Amino acid sequence: MALLDIARMRIEFASRRGTLVAVDGVSLSLDRGEILGVVGESGAGKSTIGNAVIGLLEYPGRLAGGEVHLDGQRIDTLSESDKRKVRGRRIGMIFQDPLTSLDPLQTVESQLVETMLVHLDLSHAQAQQRAVDLLRQVGIDQPELRVKQYPHQFSGGMRQRVVIALALCCEPEIIIADEPTTALDVSIQAQILDLLRKLCKEKQVGMIIITHDMGVIADITDRVAVLYRGKLVEQGPTAKILGNPDHPYTRSLISAVPRPDIKLRRFPLVTYIEDVKTPVKPMDIATHWLGQRRDFGEHVDGPLVQVQDIGMRFVLKSAFLVRHRRTLDAVKQVNFSIAQGEVFGLVGESGSGKSTVARLISGLYTPSGGSVIFNGTNLTTLKDEKRMNAFRRQIQMVFQDPFSSLNPRMRVLDIVAEPIRFHKLADNEAQTRSIVSDLLDVVGLGASAASRYPHEFSGGQRQRICIARALATRPRFLICDEPTSALDVSIQAQILNLLKDLQEQLGLTMLFISHDLPVIRQMCDRVGVMRHGELLEVADTETLFKSPQHEYSRHLLNLMPQLQAMSRESLEIEATTV
Amino acid sequence: MIARLAPLFARAADSDLWYSFKRTPSAVISAVITLVIVVGALCAPFIAPHNPFDLASLNIMDANTPPAWNPEGTTDFLLGTDDQGRDILSAILYGSRVSLFVGFASVLFSMVLGVSLGLISGYVGGRVDSIIMRIADVQLSFPAILIALLIDGVARGLLPRDMHDQLALYVLIFAIGISGWVQYARTVRGSTMVERNKEYVQAAKLIGIGPLTILRRHILPNVMGPVLVIATIHLAIAIITEATLSFLGVGVPPTAPSLGTLIRIGNSYLFSGMWWISIFPGIALVALVLSVNLLGDWLRDALNPKLR
C-alpha cells in the first residue's frame, strides 16, 4: 500500500463571483523514500494540494470531495485536534521563504525543542540533545553553538536548513516542501536539493516537492505529476515525463524552458497558455509611426552606449564624522560598451549590482563616479533638463515586477499614452489614441485593452503593457531588468519571443539583465558576468558558455540545472510545426 | 455627460466596496442616519417649522414649552422651546447646518494641508522631511482642543469685536483644521515613501515627467485610500470639537447657534426640569457623530484586506 494516497481530491474556493475549482479530481500516491514532484504554473493548484493534505486549507477554501489516506488511515475527515497530531508529527512541511517561516524572537533551539515536546515523549534534555543532532544532520557547522542563536544570525541558505531540521525533528513519514528553493540563489539551491535528497533516501521519508521550476524537478525527483488549471494532466517517472511527455500541455511547458545547451532562434510557440491575441492586423513596422521619424539626429559611430569606470556608493549610515559613516559600493569601476543593434546581457546572483547598473545607465541613479556615454554625449554631466529629455526618449526600461510597474489608478490607454503626450510625439489626441491601440496590437494584447485597468490583467499581460509603454517613446535603447523573472515559464517564453521580435523589427539595442543563464543564452549576443559589484568577464555568449574564462563564470555555469529535456530533434519538430 | 458617467457607476456598483457596504448592516444604518441629518440640515429653511434666527418671530411667552407629548406642550413646538421661546426642532435643524459646515470645511482644510505636506515630506525626504515631521511631533504633544482654544484666543485678541463675531465661523474652521493636519501628513508621508520606490514611479521618471506631475498624477491617487478613512473619522472629531468649543462659549456666536451652543444654553436649565433643551440637540449630535464614526470604521475595514 502506498504511504500517502490522495484520491479524486477536489478543492473549491467560494467567492462572490462564483465558485472556483482550484483542484479538480486529482489522484496521487507516494511511497516511502520516494520524491514526487508536483509541477505546474501559478494558479495550477499545486500549493493548495499541499495545504489540503496537512489540513491547512484556509477559508474560503474547502475540500469538496475525495479522500486522503496516510498509511491506510483516512486523515481528511479527522477532527481539528486529531489533525494537529498528524501535522508536524507524521507530516512535516517546508515553506518557500525561510525568512518568514521561523519565529524571529525565539532561538533555533527553543523552536526545535518546543515542536519535539509537543509531539514526542522526550525529556527537555533529550530534546535539546536531539536538536543539536538534527542541526548536524542538516549540515550546520558547530551545531552546539549555533543552536543557541536566533534566526537572523543565519544566512538564507542556513535558515532553510534550520527549517528542514524543524520539519524533520519528529521523524515524520512524509515531508511536503512547497517551493523550498525559490527564494534562494542558485548555488545555495543546489546544496539544499542535495540535502533533501540525501535525507529522504537515508530516512526513507516520502517527499512531495511542489515547484514551478523544471530544473528542480530534473535534479531531485523520482516521479513527476503535472498540474494544469487544477487538473492532473500527466504523471510518471521523471525521465519519461521530461524526455518524452505524452500530454501536449507538458510538451509545451517543457519546450518553454530556456535551453542551457543550445541557442534557439525562437521559443517554439506554445499553444496552451493564457489567451493572448496575436496581432489582429499584420503590421509593417518599418513604415508605421513606430518605425518612422526616428529623429534622433546624428548617425551612430562606434558603440551606442559606453559605460566608463562607473561606480555607485550607497550611504547606509550617514554621520558627521567620516569614520562613523557606513557605505556600500554596489557597483565598482564597471566598464563595458554596447554596439548599435546589439543585445548585451548582464548576469549575476542577487546583490551583484546588475540592477544598479541598469538604473545608473537609465539615469534613475546618479553615479558616484565614472560616466555613461550615449552616442558620444556624456549623460552624467548633462544638467539641462531639456537636453536630458531628448535622451530620456531614447532610453527606456522594462522592469522586473509587473505588479508594481503600472499605476493601478490609470487606464491602460493613459499609461501607454503618457510618454507620447509628455514628449508631444503625436499631432493630436486622435493620433495618440490610434498609436496606443497599434502599440497594444504589436505587443499582442489587442486594442480593446486600452479602456481597462491594470488589475484586470495577468502578470504576463501586464508585462506586455510595460513593453508597450517603453516603446511609446520610440526608444533606440531598451533596458530590460529581469523582465521575466516574476513570470511563469511559458509566459516567459512568450515575452522573450516578443522582445526578440521587437528587437529585430525595430533594430533596438538592448541591455538584458537576468540571473538566469539559460535565458541569457537565448537572448544575448554578448554577456558580462557580475559579482559583488564588479564586472568579472565580458565575452560573446557562445564563447562564455563554451569556454568561460573566469573561475566564477565556470562556477555559475556548473550550477546551471542540466535539464535532460526533450531531445533536440523533437524540439525542432515542435518549433517547425507551430 | 451621463454617457461618460455611466461606466463609472457600473464600476462603482460592481466594486468590492459596494459589495461590502451592502453586507454591513451597521454601515447601511449609519449611512441612512447621516444622510437624514445632512438632508435635514441642507433643507432646514424649507422644512423647519420656525425660523430660530428671526428674532422678531420669537415670543417670550412661548419660552420653556415642553415637548408636544407632555400635557403642557403644544404641537406647534414638537420638541419644545428654549428659554427665549425658540423651537428646539428648528434650532437643531439649523444648528446641524453650522456643525456640519464647520465639520466638513475644517476636514477639507486639514486634508489639503496635511496631504500636501505629507506628499512633499515623503517624496523629497531628507531635511525637508525632518523639519515637517518635527513640527508635526511638536503639535502632537498638545491636545487638539488646546490648539483650537489658543487660535481662537489669538483671533479674539487681534480682531475687533464686531469683526470677530462675523468671522467667528471661519476662525473656528481654521482652528479645528490646523489642529488636525498631522494625522493626514503622517499617513500620506508613509504611503508616499512606499509608492515613491515602486517601479511605476520610476517609469514615469524615465519618461522625464517632473516631480510635481508625478506627485499629482501618480502618487496622490494611490495614497488617497487611507486618507478617506481618516477624513471620515476626523469629520466626527471635528464636529465634536466644534460642539465642545461652542459649549465652552468660544465657538460660534449664540445668535447663530450650533448643536454645541444649544447644549450649553440648555445646560443651565437641566436641573430645573427643562431637560429637553439640552437632550434633543445632544441626541442629534450623538447620532451624527456615532454614525459618521461607524462609517469610518467600516471604510477602514473594507479598504484594509488584512483586517477582514
Image (tube, rainbow, N blue to C red):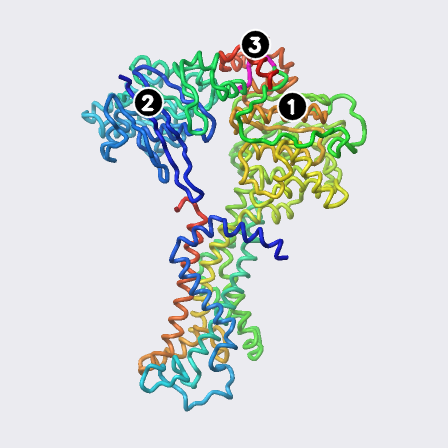
User: Can marks 3 and 2 be said to lie on one chain?
Assistant: yes
Q: CA distance from mark 2 to mark 1?
A: 41 Å
Is tag 2's residue or tag 1's residue first in the polypeptide sequence?
A: 2
Q: At label 3, which amino acid type do we have?
A: Glu
User: Can marks 3 and 1 be said to lie on one chain?
Assistant: yes
- Relative to the observer, which residue lies in front, A282 or B59? A282
Instruction: Say whether residue B45 is magenta.
Output: no
Disc 3 designates what residue? A569
Camera sees residue A159: no
Quarter where residue B159 is shown? bottom right
Cβ–Cβ below 8 Å for labels 3 and 1? Answer: no
Disc 1 designates what residue? A500
Q: Chain of mark 3?
A: A
Span colored in magenta: A257-263
The quadrant of the image that shows the N terminus of chain A is top left
Q: At label 1, which amino acid type do we have?
A: Lys
Q: CA distance from mark 3 to mark 2?
A: 38 Å
